[in-house]
Structure formats: structure tokens, C-alpha cells
Image: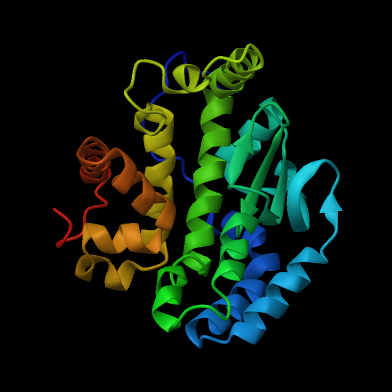
Amino acid sequence: MRLQKYLIEAIINIDKSDVEMILKPLKPWIKRLRNAVISVDFLSISKFINDVSKIKTHGSKSGKYLASFSSGQLKSPLAKEAHKIKPITIHSGFPGFNNAYDPVDNDITVGLPIQSVNDLLRIVGEVDKRDLERYHNEFTEDRVRASIRHELTHWIDDCIHNLFLNKKMIRAREVYYKKEDPASVMKGKKSHQYLTAEEINAAIGSIEELKRNNEDEWDGWTFDDILNKIPPLKTLDATIGQEWRVAIKKRMAREKLLGKKMK
């Protein structure tokens, strides 16, 4: 593989079969939780959370995981090349905090974050069904597919660009241990970390994944529909605002991802 000195902004092509392999262990859990949330079945939600707590932990990793895969199992050509440079383990299940690619620990943790699942505990038995509506898009296969694609994009970007994320993360940890702000390392010259080229690239990957699984409906959706179906992007839109929205839409236009109602 020819390594690039500077990050080239382009969609990282990842085979659908790779995404589905990582998603497969989670499918029955997603269906079970989603059905409970939509039907406002507080007893089933509580039992689900209890069952998640019984899943064995995976070494020192924060969270509960149903399956682990070697990056050597991935079929995408770019993933095969990335595996030669930096093999990783992909843990599918319930990450302790967020979905993430950790270049220092050489792994990806992805699925339904326990933090999101445990949020339900605070509302079980205390609120009416309207308070559950915001979770309808949090626990879907499309949302998890988008997260898988996002993290795989980070890993491959890192591998084909001289392990720049690995180096950046090491510097950020060094800064953190000095009790300084690691965000200054992660965001570089940008006003926010999630405006960097690598984060925009990963976000575009997740949007392309959503489109791949919803081609027939795409032109009927608005940009806000995309944000609703990928909640982490909705959070970024609310946090960063217009600058992020403009950056994402520009990349979407360039990659021909803008539907008829999204301009």
C-alpha cells in the first residue's frame, strides 16, 4: 500500500459483508430492546438491562461484548491492506462509553453504548411514553451500522496515512497525563475536534452506509432526517452548529450523497 503524507478526503469503501459480520451478534439484542422501547414495555426494558449486566467483561476493556473479530477476517480490499499495517481486534456489543477506534490499544469497540442503555434506567417507571421517543432511533440496526462504518473508516484512514491518528492519540495522552487539555492536540488548527478532516471523513462514511441501506427512500429524506437516524451526528449538529453542518453538506455534495430534499 502506498502511504499518503497528507490525509486524502475520500470515502473509504468497506464491503457490506464486513459491516454485517460485526453487526450480526447484536441483531437480536437490538430487535429486543427496540421492540420494548417502542411498545413502552418498562418491564422488558429492565430485564434487558439486567441481562446486559450479566454479559462477561472482556479483559480490561470497559463494556460488555458479545463477540470479537480479528481485522484479518475483513474482506474489503482496503481493510486487508490496513490489517497488514496495523492489525486490530473489533469488539461487538455494548461499549462502556462510546463507540471508538483506539489506535493505542489496537482495537475498535462498537455497538450499543452501555451509557445509552443505562439512560433508560432513569426513566423506567417514572415517565410517560413521550420520553421514550428520543430513543427510537438510538437503538436501530442502521444506527449501529453507521457506527461500525465510522470506526472502520478511522482505522483505515490511520493505516493509509502513516498512522497519524496513533501518533496524535499518543500525544494527547501525554498531554492529559501532564494535566493539560488533550483536546488541543485532537482538534489541531480547527475550532473543534469534529471539524478535522478525519472526523468529517468518518461522518461521511457513516452517512454513505445509511444511504447504502436505504437507497429507495433517500431522495424523500431531508438532511435532518439523516441526523435523526444517526443520533451522534445530531448531537454534533447541536453542539457545533452551522460550521459543522456546512462542512458535512459540502462533502456530501462532492460525494454525490445529497438527496433531492437535502440541499
Identify whether 128 is placed above or below 222.
below
Q: Residue at x 38, y 27 (%)?
A: 196
What is the quadrant of the N terminus in the image? top right
Q: Position of residue 105 (x, y in %)?
A: 73, 31
Quick check: 222 left or right of 175? left
Q: Residue at x 61, y 18 (%)?
A: 176
Identify whether 5 is placed above or below 150.
above
Residue positioned most to the front: 126
Looking at the rendered structure, the number of numbered marks drawn on it comes to 0
Q: Residue at x 27, y 38 (%)?
A: 244
Q: Position of residue 108 (x, y in %)?
A: 66, 42
Identify whether 187 is placed above or below 56.
above
- For the question of whether residue 14 can be seen, the reply is no
Q: Position of residue 221 (x, y in %)?
A: 23, 67
Q: Position of residue 137 (x, y in %)?
A: 43, 68
Residue 133: quadrant of the picture: bottom left
Residue 132: quadrant of the picture: bottom left
Quick check: 19 left or right of 251? right
Quick check: 4 left or right of 167? left
**Colouring chosen for the image of the structure:** rainbow
- For the question of whether residue 248 can be seen, the reply is yes
Q: Residue at x 69, y 26 (%)?
A: 104
